[in-house]
Amino acid sequence: MIPYEVILKKRNGGKLNREEIEFMVMGYVRGEIPDYQMAAFLMAVYFRHMDKEERAILTEVMAKSGDMIDLSKIGERIVDKHSSGGVGDKTTLVVAPLVASVGVPIAKMSGRALGHTGGTIDKLESIPGFKTSLSLEEFISNVKKYGIAIAGQTANLAPADKKIYALRDATATVDEISLIASSIMSKKLAGGANAFVLDVKAGSGAFMKTIEEAKKLAEAMVGIGKAHGKDTVALITNMEEPLGIYVGNSLEVLEAIEFLKGNYDEKFFELCIEISSYMVRLSGKMSEKEAKNALLENLKNGKGLEKFRDLIKAQGGDERVIDSPQKYLPISQETLEIKSEKTGYVKDIDTEKIGIASILLGAGRINKEDTIDPSVGIKVMKKIGDKVEKGESLATIFISKKSRVSEAIKTIKEAYTIAEEPAKKLPMIYEVIS
Ligand code: URA
């Protein structure tokens, strides 16, 4: 077989078999197939797409290109969650301890910020001392002992995806459903869980801008999960506005702690309880009703919060952030209000712009090698449908010396559309695909 044959077959709309997919992916990983042929192959997939079987094979080949984490030593069914990425998405920080608190173990590998979206690992690292790099032995031992561990992905997790993703990034072939779905699911399969709850975001702050696109991605990922014998459920959720109140690393940890103390934004609450409840149900330990009751009970009695404390202590972090987050988290004391220039109703928020503004403040990376400033970010004061008076605050920004303040303010102002007519509030969850 030569690469030319496989590229030609896909370019002409043919269906590839396992041997052909393996030949291209592993040949590329081993350096036997050059960038230009892999780029042509990816462009052929971009225009001709892949069907269910091809996607499942591509995912498996990429997953098996590196370490396949074995979680069987934990001795329980492991349910993982994944978000396709959003702005202010600190869901894992709430859901993981809450689910663990009802006796469903969490063994989670999370990622860093990508594009305009934040990453769980960067957020956790804003807790002083918190270690996100764990050996596999430590990771498994923590899950056994505390019922919870969250770590960064190991360097050798789906290396084929890493290499192909970098090429896709440079050749305008990122946004194709088969390629995105297999990229995400290869890392999930390699992570070793038995079941997955996928939070696929749709809207201005997501990679998928419409519900239709998000649904296609969700269906592709659920199909891949099922093809590999994993129970998989996907929720299509609203990312037309930032999730919850805060955007920024320490600020989002603060919001998660406050949530577990009972102080939460209603819509964010709905999302967290739905995702947690699906995770508990997929563990096989409880019915839907039992899961919801147990989760709500542990939110009320503080067991969810105590599980977050366990996680922080187990991974070397300063547990005092649980009792006094404002004091022990690095949160900037320097703030500025961004005021509305007119009276009306918030009609629309370009949420990608809010994400970009947070990067300009220092909460994300402009260049790959940049370090994140955990202390900066945005408090979102007005959401879609809210009434706003001229001079009233739309957002508060938390800044540092390095923040590009005027650009961030301009970007946040541009993100808001204020209209005279009241706008309809949007639902949090659009659809569930299982
Ligand atoms: N996230 C991933 O891991 N892969 C993609 O292709 C897109 C988003």
Image (tube, grey):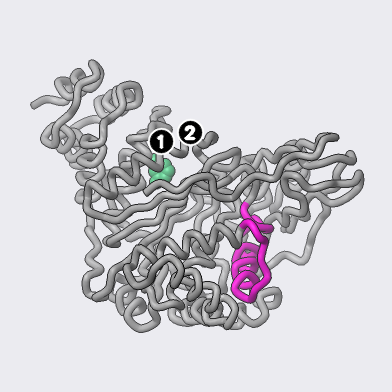
- Image point (26%, 37%), residue name: 55
The residue identified by callout 1 is 216
> Is residue 39 something that shows in the picture?
no
Q: Is residue 153 visible?
A: yes
Look at 37% across and 61% down and name the residue there.
80
Against 61, residue 363 (above or below) is below
Dot 2: element: helix
Q: Which residues are magenta?
A: 243-267
In this picture, is 252 found above or below 430?
Answer: below
Identify the residue at image location x=48%, y=75%: 294
**Which residue was labeled with disc 2?**
212
Q: Do the residues under discs 2 and 1 have CB atoms within 8 angstroms?
A: yes
Q: Position of residue 155 (x, y in %)?
A: 32, 57
Q: Is residue 178 magenta?
A: no
Where residue 78 sits, quadrant-wise, is bottom left
How dense is the environment of label 1, judged by Cα within 10 Å: few (below 14), some, or many (20 and up)? some
Q: Amino acid at mark 2?
A: Glu
Label 2: how many Cα within 10 Å (few below 14, some 14–19, many 20+) = few
Q: Dot 1 lies on which element?
A: helix
Left or right, 354 with reference to 433: right
Is 180 in front, or is 403?
180
Give the Cα separation between the discs numbered 2 and 1. 6 Å
In the rendered image, which quarter contains the N terminus?
top left
Q: x and y percent of residue 200 in the render?
A: 46, 46
Of 268 and 205, nearer the camera is 268
